[in-house]
Amino acid sequence: MTPREAIILAGGKAERLGEAAKGKPKPLVEICGRPLVAHQIRRLGAAGVERVILACAAGRGAEFASALGGLGLEIVPVEEPEPLGRGGGIRFAAKELKERSAVFAMNGDELLDVDLSRLYAAHAASGAAATVTVAPLVSPFGLVELREDGFVSGFSEEAPRLPHWINVGLYVLEPEALERFPERGDHERTTFPELAREGRLFAFRHDGIWLTVNTPKQLQAADAYVAAHPDWLA
C-alpha cells in the first residue's frame, strides 16, 4: 500500500519564466490548460494518495487552494513565513502530516511519469530511511569520435547517456528521515549525504519522462509534449 500523504514543494517564483508565468507561482503555471502541479496531484491520487500538503510562499495559500480545488484530494497549503530552502520547506510542511508513516515528497515544477507504486515497493523492500528517484544523465551534445593518433574517425549526433545519475526531486521519506531534515537549507547538502554514509539512502532508477519547467522554452516543450500525449500522466 502506497503512502496516503504527500508533500510538494511549491514555493517557486517562476522568475526565469518571465511573462510566460502570467504572475503565477511556477507550480500554478498552466500546462495544457491545467496548473503544472495539478498533473502531479492527479498521478498521486491515482497511486492512492489522499492528502497533499503544499509548501508555498507566504500569501499564496489561498491561490493554491482555489486553483487546485476539485481534484478529489485534500489540498493543504502551508505558507512558509520566509524562504526556508528545499529541506526546510519540506520539514516545515511535514508539521501538517496526520500520520507517522512514509510519505512521498517532490518538487512542484517538474513532470514525471514515475510509477509511484513501483517506487514505493522498491523503497519498502530496501528498508531505507529515504529513497531518491534518479534519472540517467544525458549529454545535450553529440560526440566527436577520435582515433588514437588524434584524427577524427566520425561523429555521433545522438545525445549519449553518460555513466552518471541525477536526482529528479521525487522521494519517499520515512519519519526518521523527515526528522533529520534541516529547519533551513537544502537536505541534499545535509540529510541525504548523512544517510548515504550510513547506508540508509536508496536510489530508484527512472528511465521515463522527466520534464523540467524553468524557462519559456521548457514550458513550451512541456505543453507540446502533454498535448501530443494526453494520457501519459493518467
Image (cartoon, rainbow, N blue to C red):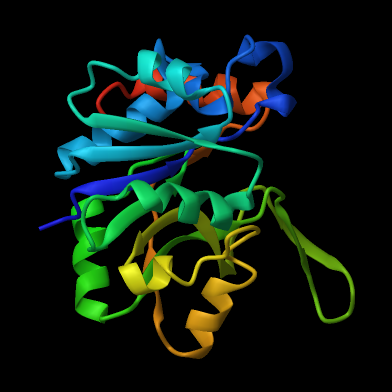
**Which residue does the image show at 37% across and 68% down from the upper left?**
131
Observer able to see residue 91: yes
Choose top left, top right, bottom left or bottom right for residue 99: bottom left
Above or below, 133 against 147 in this view is above
Is 122 displayed left or right of 175 in the figure?
A: left
The count of marks equals: 0
Residue found at the far left of this picture: 1
Residue 153's x, y, as percent? Answer: 77, 65
**Which residue does the image show at 66% across and 55% down from the upper left?**
139
Is 136 displayed left or right of 53 in the figure?
A: right
**Which residue does the image show at 25% across and 51% down from the upper left?**
116
Above or below, 45 against 147 in this view is above
Residue 80's x, y, as percent? Answer: 56, 39
Specify the quadrant that holds the C terminus: top left
Above or below, 59 against 207 in this view is above
Specify the quadrant that holds the N terminus: bottom left
Observer able to see residue 10: no
Residue found at the far right of this picture: 150
Residue 119's x, y, as percent? Answer: 27, 60
Residue found at the far bottom of this picture: 198
Is 112 displayed left or right of 1 in the figure?
A: right
**Which residue does the image show at 65% across and 59% down from the upper left?**
185
